[in-house]
Structure formats: structure tokens, C-alpha cells
């Protein structure tokens, strides 16, 4: 059966962006490029390590397939963290906190905290505290929130940043989810296909609610 275009696009994006060079170089059949070389002036020089990415390999498709075979989702899925007293005090005077930025971001998605919470696999009592700033969301929670609310990538990036996170090109989950935002792949079936392709199961998405929302 022919693979769907969005899955082919995902592999291309992954090959170009994924940067855990230890794991990349351990794939059977991977050929290490010459990173260290002698420059014209006779000194030892180093090429950009991005040359090690899978996109530069002749057997790119086969290497990605082998890489997927060994994948297991290891990203912890707990949905929130507790704020220290100092954190809560600083948040009182900061304009850039998750809770203070959330209403405007959700408004752009035509969502509310209540409607967004229904699409997440997070206990309502904890989600209410997250939305109120009494708890801080995990990275998985923010990524899931962005996907189910169909957020712009800049809004997701901003919410991640105020919680101390960012997209990490050496993390399989982050590279795959970033692709979904960049390509605006929010259809539940397509989104779940992409996540399953790289064995990502840690995102707290309420799948029944997500499926109902596109019917």
C-alpha cells in the first residue's frame, strides 16, 4: 500500500532536522561523514556537525526505517509540576506566565480553558489549576494542548518558553510534533498516524474527544 504523502513528508523533515548524532551514528549501515579535515592553511578544522544528519546519507530511507524499528517512547507523561513559593511570587509580577498568556492564545484558536481541557487527557481538577497558574504544565501537556487546539507554532513556542521549554532537535517527539505544527496537520487521524509512525504515546490527548471534534 502506498504511504500517505504526509508520512513521507514527516520522514523527510525528520531526516533533515533530527540531531542526536550518537543515536544516528549507531544505526546499522550509517556512514560517518568526514567532519574533521585539514584546511588549506594546514590546520585541523571541523565541518558543521549538521552534515551528520540522515538527510545527507545515500541510504536515508533505509536508515530511517531501521531507526524506527528500535524506537520506544521514553518521554515521561506526567502532566504538571508544582510551583515553588518563590516561583509563585515571581509570577505575580510577571506578564509572561503560562496562565496569563493562555486566554489570549486560546481565544485565537476559538477555544476556552474549559473547552481545551475537554480535549486533553488531564484530570479536570489538575487542568483547572494549570489554567489558573497554580500548577505548571509539563512539556507533553503543552504540546498536546497545541495540537488539540490547532495552535500556531509561534504560540506554542511562546507557551513552552515561559515554562522553561523549547523544541529540541535531538528529541524524537519534538521533531515529529514540530512537523505537525509547521504543516498544520491537526486532523486527528493524520496526527495520530504521524505520532504512531515514531511510537510517540506520551502526549495527554483525549482521543475520543479529538475524534468527535472532526466528525
Image (cartoon, helix red, strand yellow):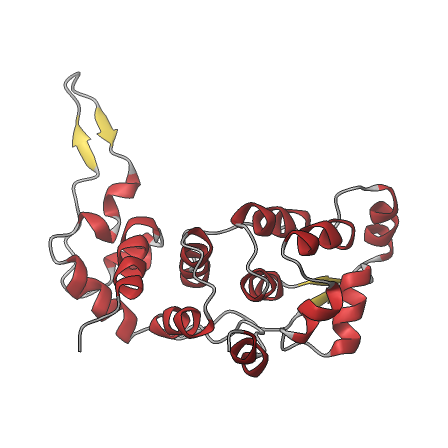
| Extreme-top residue of the structure | 41
Q: Judge by depth and name the residue closer to the eye, 66 or 113.
A: 113
Residue at image coords 74%, 64%? 113
> Which image quarter holds the N terminus?
bottom left
Question: Where residue 132 sits: x, y (%)?
Answer: 82, 61
98 vs 158, left or right, is right
Q: Judge by depth and name the residue closer to the eye, 207 or 18.
A: 207
| Extreme-left residue of the structure | 58
The answer to whether residue 30 is visible is yes
Question: Where residue 175 sits: x, y (%)?
Answer: 41, 56
Report how many numbered discs are placed on residues in the image. 0
Against 41, is 78 above or below?
A: below
77 vs 87, left or right, is left
Against 107, is 71 above or below?
A: below
Question: Where residue 163 sits: x, y (%)?
Answer: 67, 52
Against 211, is 105 above or below?
A: above
76 vs 69, left or right, is right
Residue at image coords 68%, 56%? 106
| Extreme-front residue of the structure | 215
The answer to whether residue 82 is visible is no
Residue at image coords 54%, 71%? 203
116 vs 6, left or right, is right
Quarter assignment of residue 192? bottom left
Against 147, is 206 above or below?
A: below
Question: Where residue 52 sits: x, y (%)?
Answer: 24, 47
Amino acid at each position: 500500500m502506498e504511504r500517505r504523502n504526509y508520512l513521507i513528508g514527516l520522514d523527510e523533515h525528520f531526516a533533515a532536522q533530527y540531531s542526536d548524532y550518537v543515536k544516528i551514528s549507531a544505526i546499522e549501515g550509517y556512514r560517518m561523514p568526514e567532519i574533521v579535515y585539514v584546511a588549506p592553511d594546514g590546520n585541523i578544522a571541523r565541518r558543521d556537525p549538521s552534515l551528520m544528519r540522515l538527510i545527507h546519507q545515500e541510504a536515508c530511507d533505509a536508515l530511517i526505517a531501521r531507526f524506527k524499528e528500535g524506537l520506544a517512547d521514553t518521554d515521561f507523561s506526567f502532566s504538571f509540576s508544582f510551583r515553588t513559593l518563590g516561583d509563585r511570587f515571581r509570577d505575580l509580577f510577571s506578564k509572561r506566565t503560562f496562565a496569563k498568556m493562555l486566554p489570549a492564545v486560546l481565544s485565537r484558536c476559538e477555544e476556552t480553558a474549559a473547552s481545551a481541557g475537554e480535549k486533553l487527557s488531564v484530570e479536570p481538577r489538575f487542568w483547572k489549576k494549570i489554567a489558573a497558574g497554580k500548577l505548571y504544565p509539563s512539556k507533553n501537556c503543552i504540546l498536546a494542548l497545541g495540537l488539540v487546539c490547532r495552535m500556531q507554532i509561534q504560540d506554542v513556542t511562546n507557551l513552552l518558553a515561559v515554562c522553561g521549554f523549547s523544541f529540541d532537535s535531538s528529541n524524537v517527539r519534538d521533531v515529529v510534533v514540530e512537523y505537525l505544527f509547521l504543516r498544520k496537520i491537526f486532523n486527528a487521524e493524520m496526527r495520530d498516524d504521524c505520532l504512531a509512525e515514531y511510537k510517540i504515546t506520551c502526549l495527554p490527548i483525549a482521543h475520543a474527544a479529538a475524534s468527535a471534534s472532526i466528525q
